[in-house]
Amino acid sequence: MEKVNSKTSRLQKFKKIFDNKLKHQIENSPPDVIKKYIHESLFKYLDDKKILIYSQAQGSPLGIIILALFIFLFLGFLKGYKEMLLFPGIIFTIICSLLIVFGIIYKITIPTKEIILNRETGMFTFPGYMWKKEVTLPFSELIVGWFGAGGVTGNLQMELVCRHPKEWKKGARLYGHSNLYYENWSFYVWYMDRNRPLPPGDAFDPYRERDFLRRKAEGFPPPLYKSYVPTPEATPEQQKEREQYWTDEQYTEKFEREEGSTWYDPQIHNDWEETTYLKPETKTPVANRYVKFIFNDGRIIYSQTNEDGSLYEPPESEDFEMLFVSIKKP
């Protein structure tokens, strides 16, 4: 493999990763969806046909109202409230008043902001910005990536984001029950693959039998998306019945990671540098290949090249061995 190093700024690094869309595949087994998530601050509704997730992508107008009130009260305390009705204080008073009025109007008139995963129809809906209409499109056409944003602690947080395939200005953050964006994406893909069993978690238990009977009536069609983890049925009896049509071995890539190994995480491995790998004979990208980094201290970290043959690898100061992983086909 021919190795091409690329020195990029932090801003260019995040932009590059954001431009690299995630594939529609199940790479990780997501955390269980437990009942307490329902009707609280995350899942508004959930069954075997549809999931409604509260969206905070556009933020709450309460922040604007509180900020405007704080500025007005703080300046009034320093200058005196009578001064806030005279020039130049009146300017701040007008600005704060407009912000408060805007926040109240926005709070009253803002449309419902929901992320909708429709397993039955294969359609996906994400909310529009502010008063703009929601966007609905086939899940298979959804373009998803990750984006680095500052958290409340000042640390970088990697969030799952999507954008419209035809209108790049339309997009939203995608929320889930994991703090890891790639686990949330695996959960989205798993749920939207209507030919697989429902994802793990007792929140889905009341609907597993109905979902199984529906897939059975349809003749257990093969999965829609590739998986790197098994997606078994709820009971051994159901598993045996389904395996008359297809098995996990047929539709699960043989990619078993060692216990304790991890995936490349841009939030943790923020000093890794971008590198592009090309086939020496053709100069074409070594695209979509899994890579294993083995460190002298025993750590094992996996990554994957993108369509351009690029990935992020440890700095040269670290002592490691790099191997391209060969996926075993059934």
Image (cartoon, helix red, strand yellow):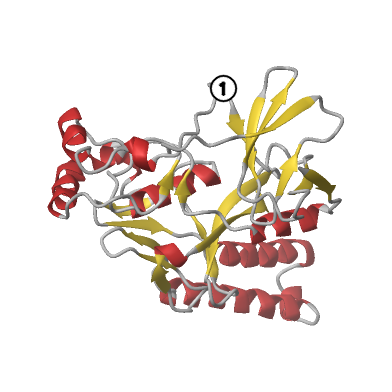
Q: Amino acid at mark 1?
A: Gly
User: What is the secondary structure assignment of the residue under circle 1?
Assistant: loop
Residue furthest to the top: 297
Placement of 192 over or under 295, stated as above or below = below
In the image, 234 versus 171, the foreground residue is: 234
Q: Is residue 58 visible?
A: no
Task: Locate residue 247, reporting x and y percent.
Answer: 29, 38
In the image, 232 versus 95, the foreground residue is: 232
In the image, 39 versus 275, the foreground residue is: 275
* Residue 154 image-quadrant placement: top right
Q: Which residue is mark 1?
A: 260
Q: Is residue 294 visible?
A: yes
Placement of 53 over or under 329, stated as above or below = below
Compared across the picture, whether 298 is left or right of 47 comes to right
Q: How many marks?
A: 1
Q: Residue at x 47, y 38 (%)?
A: 28
Task: Locate residue 69, reporting x and y percent.
Answer: 62, 65
Task: Locate residue 85, reporting x and y percent.
Answer: 71, 79
Compared across the picture, whether 1 is left or right of 118 comes to right
In the image, 133 versus 40, the foreground residue is: 133
* Residue 14 image-quadrant placement: bottom right
Point out the image quarter for the C terminus. Answer: top left
Point out the image quarter for the N terminus. Answer: top right
Crowding near the residue tagged with mark 1, few <14, some 14–19, many ≥20 C-alpha atoms within 10 Å: few
Placement of 83 over or under 272, stated as above or below = below
Q: Residue at x 76, y 81 (%)?
A: 86
Task: Locate residue 36, reporting x and y percent.
Answer: 32, 40
Residue furthest to the front: 281
* Residue 204 image-quadrant placement: top left
